[in-house]
Image: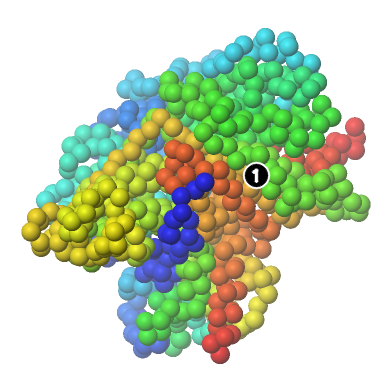
Amino acid sequence: MRVSCTLNGRPIEWEIVPNETLLDSLRSHGLTGTKRVCESGECGACAVIVDGLAMDSCLLLTAQIDGADVVTVEGLETAGTLHPVEAAFAENGAIQCGFCIPGMVVTAANFLEQNPHPSEDEVRHVFNGNLCRCTGYKKPIEAVLNAAQTMGEQR
Amino acid sequence: MSVATSVVGRRAPKVDAIKLATGRATFADDVDIRGLLHTKLVKSPYPHARITSVDKSRAEALPGVEAVITWEDVPRIPFTTAGQSWPEPSPYDMYILDNKVRFVGDPVAAVCAETPEIAARAVELIDVGYEVLPAILDYRQSMNPGAPIIHDEPESYGIYDAGRNIAAHIDVEIGDLEAGLREADLVIEHEFQVQYQQHTCLEPHVTIAFLDEDQRLVLRTSTQIPYHCRRMLAFALDIPVRNIHVIKPRVGGGFGNKQEVVTEPIAAVLALKTRRPVKLEYTREEEFTIARMRHPQHLKLRTGVRRDGSITANEVNVLTNTGAYGTHSLTVTGNTGTKPLPLYRSPNMRFYADIVYANLPISGAFRGYGAPQGFFAMEVHMDEVAESLGMDPLEFRKLNHIRQGDTDLMSAAAGEGAGKKARVMHSCGLPECIERGSAAIGWREKRGKPGTGPRRRGVGMCILMQGSGVAGDELAAAALKMNEDASFNLMVGSADIGTGSDTTLSQIAAEVLGVPLDHIIIKSGDTDHISFDYGAYASSTAYITGTSVLKASEDARQQIVAVAGRMMDEDPEGLLVHDGRVSSLNGKSVSLQEVAMECLYGEDKKLIIGTGSHATKESPPPFVAMFAEVEVDVETGQVHPIEIVTAVDVGRALNPDICEGQVEGAVAQGLGYALTEEILVGDDGRVLNPCFMDYKIFAAPDMPKLTTILVEAEEPTGPFGAKSVAEIAINGPAPAISNAIYDAVGIRLHSLPMTAEKVLAALDAKADA
């Protein structure tokens, strides 16, 4: 079957099998920033933004995104400029192995759209669905708060 | 005093941070390989059985299936999957595939096919005949007379006593333990139990194996040990080292689980058989069942003390469950004794251990490497010893802890360092760690004030030491070459598995060569490079590989000043290299770019290549004083960690952001070990909780406040004064929290994880008593 949607701002059309997950489709089309970890919606490493909401792509069938607007980690950078969340993660020492980081960056970028001035506690809770085994979450949370400040200054 | 530096010691962003933040970094499975085959495993449903037959004909007939392999298709060469120096100190008790299975999930056969779906269907078409054998599912029964013998195969070797299921054994004594106990005013004994913990690296084990155009076997694999992996595969496959090329791409976490060859051997056999690229990637369930775990242990500690608080004798006695195979069996448990025992000055010490097989999941290396088990027991026990003497636990530790100038005899007597030189403490920042950590938590103000009502507060503490590499069993080698623009390609064999070593090693090179960090182009962990390294384990990279990079950079620097001296007509001695220039005290200078161009295109052409290798008998310990504040709900038994303060002596922080990150991550894993994480095995030998929903690691909302204090007691043998930081902090949360729970509600927990059920049971027992 065929699906068409907007992916990172561009129209695409894919030939898929009906039981294909969005995670598999993205990775097989070279969008490997989205990571396969648990395949059961427990860890958030495969988070993407679908119609303005961060979701786990391992729990979505590609068939479900027909007509949707999908943004992956590869779509956050604009015209060669890092997304403020990406820059903050890099500058704050918030990245260790980096396997969970695209999911965290996508989740945080989406969250800051909805809540531009979050408290530390709100950031802590938005990461409830993003497991990380390296950082202890402290520096990623600080990175999101710093990104919120940068984005506020840019507005 | 530390040397003034401009790149070392800075909070420089990681050299790979941007590619990781943007998702551009390529991990093992992030490449497209034409014609890639996918592998699935046939796994044993029984904990202990002989394979009587395997009918693979129906699977082989399935269109799309390229190969099916069983024990009959692999070399019968006993080996160990433990990635250690050669010859490995672990028993040679594994086969790529075997005619016997020793735990539920033990691989019986492997299928590779055009798609993962076809491979999965083929697995179901393979008929395996089993002769089911009696199994040992409680490792305390493993040494019983008449117990089933798990390794009865004649080919295996290096097993301490296969007939009694003892993989490895330790018995060392310093002084005379019994005499020391007789001198004591008080002898205090306690027992402890610790569980299986799983690493849960977010990236599972994954290997892509293929033959290159020269027919060499290439492994693109998620590993901590590229060079050991090459040597061990050559051994297990009986092919020359020169025919193997191991590439470590970005690695999504290791924590010891990838200090093993796990997915590599089967992928290699299939690639050699099919002559096509083959991928073997563990599923999350396979990570939780057939990868590796932290060794469960039963520990007994016995300590003799005088009324004045001095220790006359100290003993650690351990029974360890290595599971079905003995990978890292001797050496992990070695650290259970050799890390905690020397922390306390005592003239008499004994360390005794049996490491036994059981028909259970495989234990292996895991961050801390035996020390978390040992420190949980030792640091709760020492709290109780202090209490028996009526002393504040902090003051008791200050009285007895190891000091600068002391010698650690224990680590030279047992474990991996056995037979090696005794460790002298050239640096010890523990007193400063204790002072600053206790001030940060508010030890004096908070201690002994649990409050009233259902939620009680308490504070507890512990002290810790680790090592910086395996003393006498490390080698690292680095090379760098100079380019036209005064950039340098740096090649190291170490594996940055998320630890930040690509960054700290680049900082060392940039510092010595007087260039900005972005002038160092690092490539790490590729066995075809001019480099060598034992790998990323034992907290070795900053100290061992760091020194090799320091030497290589100094070698290049010497060559640079020789050329610059000729160019300026100055004596090379006394020339300074800094800020991209070489300058003399007479005010002359040339840029490094001019030196590079002179070398490559001038009169005396010569490529500047610096090399350095480093091996040492030293392994200076970092030290930690950790403090925990907890809240215990006496109605539910729930323990909420409020704050963890970690004051850590790292010698010199090469990059404070990276040091803090290592500590904070280790604390998070240690919190899970303390409170929530446990692999549960059912009566049939099956893992009952093989997913994140049922195996609880700490998530962001669960985290307490983390306060990290970097103490810099410069280590004279380390690069720029550095020693290690990666593992040590994982040892602390379990004992610090157990001690804090006692301060809050007066119960002593000796078993991990400290679940609400155990807290409530202990509160009930206390109320009954």
Q: Amino acid at mark 1?
A: Cys
Which residue occupies 44% across, 38% down? B717
On screen, residue B230 above or below B117: above
On screen, residue A78 above or below B687: below
The spot of residue B176 in percent (x, y) is 62, 11
Is any atom of residue B504 visible in this view? yes
Which residue occupies 63% across, 71% down? A123
Residue at mark 1:
B433
Is any atom of residue B691 visible in this view? no
Seen from the viewer's position, the closer of residues B74 and B482 is B482
The spot of residue B424 in percent (x, y) is 51, 28
Q: Residues within 10 Å of mark 1 (few under 14, many from 20)?
A: many
Horizontal arrangement in the rendering, residue B654 relative to residue B591 (left or right): right
- Secondary element under disc 1, as helix, strand or loop, is helix
Label 1 is found on which chain of the structure? B
Looking at the picture, the colour scheme in use is: rainbow
Given the current orientation, which residue lies at the most extreme left position? B603
Seen from the viewer's position, the closer of residues B317 and A6 is B317
Seen from the viewer's position, the closer of residues B695 and B239 is B239
On screen, residue B484 above or below B732: below
The spot of residue B711 in percent (x, y) is 59, 48
